[in-house]
Image: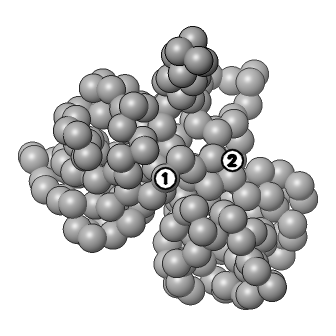
Amino acid sequence: MFTGIVEAVGTLAEVKGTGGGYRVRIHTPLAAHVKLGDSLAVNGVCLTVILIDGEDVLADVGPETSRVTTLGALQRGQSVNLERPLRFDGRVDGHFVQGHVDGVGTVEDVRPESEAHWMTIAFPPTLAAYFIRKGSVAVDGVSLTVAGLGERQFDVQVVPYSWANTTLKLLRAGDRVNLECDMIGKYVVRGMELRKS
C-alpha cells in the first residue's frame, strides 16, 4: 500500500530481458533504505526488490505487468517516480494507492498557469465509472485531484512542489502514463454491479 507521495526520482540504469519479462536496475538514494523483498512503487507500479547493489535497486517486471502498464516501454536513462510502502505508524498524505495499475492513459495537453501546471489526460472508456470530480487518481504514481472531468479525459493541476520533484514535468502531449483509480470508488462500483445481478 502506498500514498502517491513520491519520495524520490530514480534513473533507470539497465533493462535486461528475462524470458517473457525483464529486470530493471534503478539508481536511487532509496537503495540504502530498502531491503530484499520490500515493495517499491515505480511509476505507480508495485514491484518487489530482488537485489540491492550499492545505490542500485533491482526488480523483475513480469509479462502481464509489461503488457498492462507503461513499464514495458521504459528505456535506459529514463527517470522514474519512486515510493516506498506506507507505514501505518505514521501520517497518511495523498490517498490510498495499491500500486495496481487500472489502465494506461495518454497525455493530451500540458499548460502552465502561474507557477502550477494543468494536465489533460485521456483514459480508456472502461475506467469512466471510477472518476469523479474532486476525487483522487494516481498518475505515474503521483497522487492528484481530478479537477475537471469529461467523458474520456480528466484535468489535474500539479502544484509547483510536485512538478519540481516528480517526473510529471517531463511529460508531453502523446506520452502514456499509468493510471490507478481511487480504491474506494472501485469497491463502490463493484458493490453496485453485484446488487444489480
Residue extending farthest front: 197
Left or right side of 35 for 33: left
SS state under label 1: strand
Question: Which residue carries the number 2 mark?
Answer: 84
Q: Is residue 22 above or below residue 177?
A: below
Residue 11 image position (x, y, % from top left): 57, 75
Amino acid at pointer 1: Gly
**Residue at (83% x, 51% y) in the render:** 38
| Residue 33 seen in the current view | no
**Residue at (89% x, 55% y) in the render:** 37
Amino acid at pointer 2: Arg
| Residue 69 seen in the current view | yes
Residue 32 image position (x, y, % from top left): 78, 60
SS state under label 2: loop
**Mark drawn on residue 43:** none
Nearest to N terminus: mark 2 or mark 1: 2
Q: What is the crowding at mark 1: few (fewer than 14 residues within 10 Å), some, or many (at least 20)?
A: some
Relative depth, front residue between 169 and 30: 169
